[in-house]
Amino acid sequence: MYIRQKKSWELSENKVTPESVYLTRRKLIQQTGLAGFGLIMGSAPISAVPIGGFPPVRNTEYTLDRTLTSEQDATTYTNFYEFGSSKNIWRKAKKLNTDPWIVTIDGLVDYPIQIDAGELTKKLGGMEERLYRHRCVEAWSMAVPWAGFPLSNLVKFASPKIGAKYIRMETFFQPEIAPGQKQSWYPWPYVEGLTINEARNELAFLAVGLYGKPLPNQNGAPLRLVVPWKYGFKSIKSITRFTFTDERPRSFWELLSPKEYGFWANVNPWVPHPRWPQDRERMLGGGTIPTQLFNGYEKEVSYLYKNEYTNNKRELFY
Ligand SMILES: Nc1nc2c(c(=O)[nH]1)N[C@H]1C(S)=C(S)[C@@H](COP(=O)(O)O)O[C@H]1N2
Ligand SMILES: [Mo]
């Protein structure tokens, strides 16, 4: 039997410490700026250092206008074409071995590196929890607590060169265990991309957990992108590579159908998908509500698109 060894960032201190103490200590560590490198890499006994561990501390700046989707719904109704085009692939995804998991950071960076996802996670600082909305281009939506790190921490860590304008991200390619990848008409591996300015936006997030626990495979373990102002397909799962580049990446869905799934893919109720309207969304668990521009995150992200607005609105959204 394969017994999964816990990574240090999965240690849950709450088993030994009352929550109030745990939270206060976390705050102290954050305030004194000791999170990340210093302590966890140092010699302090790991059980006394909750940095980066589960359960994560919630960042209360990110609030919702709707109730949280149930964990059951969010973890059993998933899009992960590597395991098939049905939403019901969570059992199949168990086959993916996510430990060890080598992540490559390369391209226009000062420090190209190959590093295990657990090690990388430690280097990116203390973990936090954020409640985010998620809007799939197919017009279903959910609202869930992700645990992870700002993507900007990875950008800093990689130290991109001046010429780097985009980050290209890539998912694993293992057709032996992911049957969808035997379907050769898809342009595997799954690829997504952001501009470097999008990647530096405070909302762009790298998730390693969901509902206070490590990510289930079907939701993109061990490391996935979460960009809540864009249609869900931008939030690439189970990332193995981050490449900094001066060329706009061509993503999986863009290659398949460029008129339907463009590079920007910002949520916009006014621009219908060629085959269905986008002004409303069906929430997992029940109910239909109006869709908001940038999925409700206009205040945080609209500055990124000032130029695109005046140029070609259509291209911006698809
Ligand atoms: N590698 C990979 N990433 C992916 C997908 C996929 O098929 N493969 N589907 C995308 C789509 S269309 C959506 S809506 C979200 C779904 O995330 P969830 O299943 O965790 O809700 O993952 C995105 N990331
Ligand atoms: Mo999606």
Image (spheres, rainbow, N blue to C red):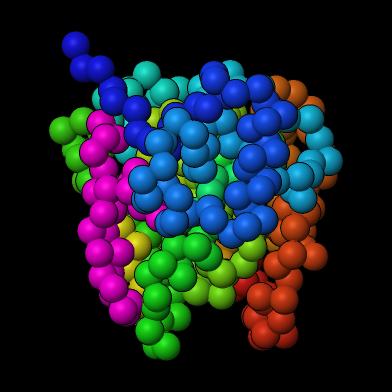
Write the residue at 50% across / 74% down.
Answer: 196
Q: Nearer the viewer, residue 69 or 114?
A: 114
| Lateral position of residue 194 relative to residue 66, left or right | left
Q: Position of residue 2 (x, y in %)?
A: 21, 17
| Lateral position of residue 176 relative to residue 189, left or right | left
Q: Based on the picture, tell me whether residue 118 belongs to the magenta stretch.
A: yes
Q: Is residue 190 visible?
A: no
Q: Quadrant of the N terminus?
A: top left
- In the displayed structure, 90 sits above or below 108; it is above
Write the residue at 79% across / 41% down.
Answer: 64
| Lateral position of residue 73 relative to residue 292, left or right | left
Q: Nearer the viewer, residue 198 or 281?
A: 198
Q: Nearer the viewer, residue 182 or 215?
A: 215
- In the displayed structure, 287 sits above or below 61; it is above
Q: Quadrant of the C terminus?
A: bottom right
Write the residue at 70% across / 22% down.
Answer: 285
- In the displayed structure, 99 sits above or below 262; it is above
Residue 242 lies in quadrant: bottom left
Q: Position of residue 108 (x, y in %)?
A: 32, 79
- In the displayed structure, 195 sits above or below 100; it is below
Q: Position of residue 185 (x, y in %)?
A: 26, 48
- Considering every residue shown, the one lying at the far left of the view is 176
Q: Position of residue 276 (x, y in %)?
A: 65, 47
Write the residue at 29% across / 35% down.
Answer: 98
Number of callouts = 0
- What's drawn in magenta, residue-wise? 97-123
Q: Based on the picture, tell me whether residue 173 belongs to the magenta stretch.
A: no
Q: Is residue 298 visible?
A: yes
